[in-house]
Amino acid sequence: GRLLAAQDRERASIARELHDDMVQRLDGVARLLRTADDPDRARWGEDVAAISADLRGLSHRMHPSLVQLRGLQEALEGLLDETRAQHCLDLSLEIRGDPVGIPPEAALAAFRIAQEAMRNAIRHGKASVVRVVVNRSPTELIVSVRDDGVGFGDLGRRSAAGLGLHSMRERAQLLRGSLEIRSTIGVGTEVTARVPVPEAA
């Protein structure tokens, strides 16, 4: 729990550094280049502005307050939009039940688990289709990420080796929840996290 909290603090620190320093400096360079008489420099300005926008998006995704400020649904929608812009994937998000009023720690855990599961689906699973489903029941929050990637057979060995899988499981368990991973070679993988939450008011 302390390790995960430290990771979130470090993410917040890096996010602030990116946003408050590097992004601002790049924006300044982009403005100078855009106003140059040289057409090539003006085009470079557009490229620098695009890099700045990507870094700004990265800083937002990294900061833990993203979920608190925007809510779980909007944060996940933003994550999917940014992932679509970077990868040629079929992504979808389905929200069942009312996501309003989810405790901040549960919402952050759900977001990080979905984020990590999507990252694994793309990098390791080589997936082309990823489905994210968030279900708010009266007593628990269920987040499921299913992909059509290559899958894997030795789940025990993979879990022991994968820090990302450990992190997802620990986030769920710290909130007295659980994480289930089902994977079949050549079919894909499904990650399902269940976290108890108080009944919505």
Image: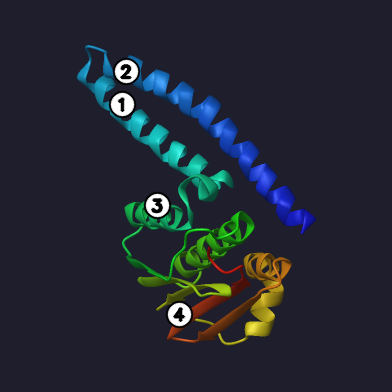
* Amino acid identity at mark 1: Trp
Q: Position of residue 58 (x, y in %)?
A: 48, 43
Numbered mark located on residue 150 in the image: 4
Q: Which of 140 and 10 is in front in this view?
A: 140
Up-down relation of residue 156 to residue 24 (above or below) = below
- Dot 4 or dot 2: first in sequence order is 2
Q: Where is residue 141 in the image (x, y as percent from the top left)?
A: 55, 71
Closer to the eye: label 3 or 4: 3
Q: Is residue 13 left or right of residue 33?
A: right
The residues bearing labels 1 and 2 have C-alpha atoms spaced at a distance of 7 Å
Q: Position of residue 134 (x, y in %)?
A: 46, 70
| Residue under label 3 | 78
* Amino acid identity at mark 2: Leu
| Residue under label 1 | 44
Q: What residue appears at the point 41 percent right and 53 percent down from the top-left corner? A: 74
Q: Is mark 2 on a helix, strand or loop?
A: helix
